[in-house]
Image: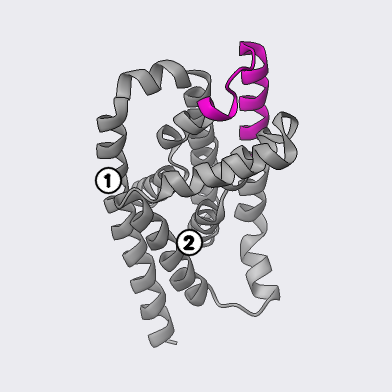
Amino acid sequence: MLDYLLEAFVTLFVTVDPLGLAPLFIGLTAGLSAADRRRIAVRATSIAAVILLFFAFAGGKLLSLMGISLAAFRIAGGLLLFSTAFQMVFSQKEPRDKSDADRAVGVDHVRDIAAFPLAIPLLAGPGAISATILAATKAPTWMHLAGFLGLVAAVLAISLMVFLLADPIDRRIGETGRVVIGRLLGLLLAALAVQFVADGVKAIMTT
């Protein structure tokens, strides 16, 4: 169970990348009061929690209704996670996320920042949703699934803390720190993504 929870936590954590979202949160909420920042942070993480918990419970059933095998989804999810990892390693994720953020501000203004782009796609994006479905469907027992749901809550709680402490965290980490952390997390996510693909291919070959 420990191995399952550790793998699930690492995958979800590096996919959501709470530390990497701190600069975006600062930019999106620039000029707002501390109280408004807190409300946006709480609302964004709450929306993301609902989305990820929904896919944790219903993601597998949705795949079944659509006639998609778990093995096929593992391969697709692994490729998607690898794409995210590639962008993290080569510093392409932050510009892409910032582009989404800038577009959202221009269209929906400040009142919708919490829902888009903070909750979607920055917190509960395609990579995080894929990781959630994969981990939830891989849980062998309800105890494992309950533990994973706790990890989802923990990752989003960390994200909330990062948002609330975004200014001091950004100053302390610095540009070099963000680059190093992003590269290391991206490399780790790439390895886990390859493992997802290998597990999916193995499952298809044995059926």
Amino acid beneath label 1? Arg
Residue of label 1: 183
Residue 104 at least partly seen: yes
**Colour theme:** one colour
Q: Residue 187 in the image: state x and y as whole percent.
A: 27, 52
**On-image quarter of the C terminus:** bottom left
Q: Residue at x 25, y 31 (%)?
A: 176
Nearer the N terminus, badge 1 or badge 2? 2
Q: Which residues are magenta?
A: 26-48
Q: Which residue is mark 2?
A: 138
Magenta segment's dominant SS is helix
The one of 78 and 176 positioned closer to us in this rendering = 176
Establish if 137 lies above or below 150: below
The residue lying furthest to the top in this view is: 34
Residue 8 is a magenta residue? no
Residue 20 screen position, x and y as percent: 41, 36
The residue sitting at 67% across, 51% down in the picture is 54
Q: Secondary structure at mark 1?
A: helix
Which of the two discs, 1 and 2, sits closer to the camera?
Answer: 1
Q: Is residue 47 visible?
A: no
Residue at the image position 66 percent from the left and 33 percent from the top: 114
**Is 85 placed left or right of 35 in the picture?**
left
Disc 2 marks a residue whose amino acid type is Lys
3D distance between C-alphas at marks 1 and 2? 27 Å
Q: Are marks 1 and 2 in contact (CB under 8 Å)?
A: no
Q: Residues within 10 Å of mark 2 (few under 14, many from 20)?
A: some
Compared with 70, 179 (above or below) is above
Horizontal and vertical percent position of residue 97: 50, 45
What mark, if any, has residue 150 been given in the picture? none
Q: Residue 51, percent across and down? A: 66, 47
